[in-house]
Amino acid sequence: MTYNPFLEMLRSRADGEITGIPSICSSHPLVIEAALIEGKANQTPVLIEATCNQVNQEGGYTGMTPSDFRQYVEQIAQKTGFDPAQLLLGGDHLGPNPWKDQPAEEAMKKAEILIAQYAQAGFVKIHLDASMSCQDDPVPLPDAIIAERSARLARIAEQSCRGEKPVYIIGTEVPIPGGAMEALDHLEVTSPQDAIATYEAHHEAFAKLGLQDAFSRVIGLVVQPGVEFGNENVVYYDPQAATDLSAALSQLPGIAFEAHSTDYQPETALSDLVRDGFAILKVGPGVTFAMREALYGLDKIATFLDHSPEKDSLEEQLEQLMQADPKYWEKYYHGDDQARRLQRHFSYSDRIRYYWPSEIARKAVDGLLARLEKYTLPETLISQFLPRLYPHYAAQKSKPSAHNLIIEMIRLVIRDYEKACRRI
């Protein structure tokens, strides 16, 4: 077997080393570029994940199939000089979710095509998620049915992969994708009994289909460690609240916990999560939130340098775009007009991220970067509008481009995950 960073991480943890793996869940080219540049600097593998809604046989909201996504990420890797052997692709929430409004058997047949295409495209980490109730299912779906459907999908993955077999993530107790829709004070941590029951249900379901070898590559279990973010607040990790759940790992051989919605946790909390067994840390909106901060800061710099009117700003162009096509935010943001405008641009859920791939947004960003190419960006304006980046560049002889400032802003977020997981 070739070097497998997931299995190596588990071996290291078994030997007492505190180590983990960050998971970058974004399809934005600037985020992927920043992740690969950071990985190249640290000489570490980089895990990029796509969700069933982003990337599927119908194109998802990115317009990409799994093979398209692989080619897309590999092109960015080539551009950055990142070693392709260190590039890991994962599939997140792979199951019937995009078709849950259809009868279960129809949705599962489409999920089988989905899983087959991810496996054929060489995705090495697959999260099996059949937790959602379909049109003719009971609500909630019983654990036994969830496990049976997950095993059914694993069988398809095993039959479809062309190279080394993937590793699997199981478990269904995940936060709402993209963050909660309301303010949160606290969360219920997954009980040890529920975590163990999920593991055992999947073990039994895999065995019934003769998938013992596949189950030996189940390396992670998704649980709720008590972290989440809403539109306006973050629930931070409390190690004391997760003590019993962490202790349950002693009864789950060869397993680490996977934590979703770790966005906006401070580096100390991320380190505590890894220490306590939540060794796979997923981040998505947090990195695009940082990218948006950089773009809006650069827009303020351009507005000052150009004396351009505020109505032509990037923020205003995005506001018009989101108002004209509200499907990605209107069900999720609440309150009066001012509150909803605030959330459209600055919510932790960062649903503005769905608009960046549009032609209007791409042209607006390209126009902003073109305007800034005319200038040597003054240190004092970086200090004013991008203060987190000022210390990094103030002492450098060569001044940064706007593109480099965006990349560095994203890397600041990813670097916290690298510190927590790799102890760099």
Image: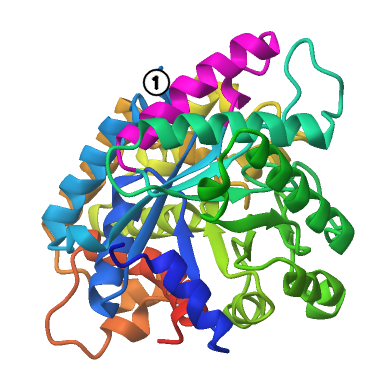
The x, y position of residue 285, in whole percent, is: 53, 51
**Tag 1: amino acid:** Gln
- Asked if the stretch drawn in magenta spans residue 125, the answer is no
Q: Is residue 109 above or below residue 353?
A: above
Q: Secondary structure at mark 1?
A: loop
Query: What residue appears at the point 74 percent right and 75 percent down from the top-left corner?
Result: 250
Query: What residue appears at the point 71 percent right and 36 percent down from the top-left corner?
Result: 147
Which secondary structure is most common in the magenta stretch? helix
Quadrant in which residue 222 is drawn: bottom right
Residue with the mark numbered 1:
57
The front one of 209 and 151 is 209
Q: Is residue 409 left or right of residue 326?
A: left
Q: Is residue 74 left or right of residue 173?
A: left
Q: Quadrant of the N terminus?
A: bottom left
Residue 355 visible, this angle: no
The x, y position of residue 249, in whole percent, is: 73, 71
- Asked if the stretch drawn in magenta spans residue 110, the answer is yes
Q: Give the number of callouts.
A: 1
Query: What residue appears at the point 62 percent right and 83 percent down from the top-left corner?
Result: 268
The x, y position of residue 35, in whole percent, is: 33, 62
How would you rate the neighbour count of disc 1 (Cα within 10 Å): few for under 14, some for 14-19, many for 20 or more? some
Q: Is residue 34 above or below residue 156?
A: below
The x, y position of residue 272, in whole percent, is: 66, 81
Q: Is residue 288 left or right of residue 172?
A: left
Q: Which residues are magenta?
A: 95-122
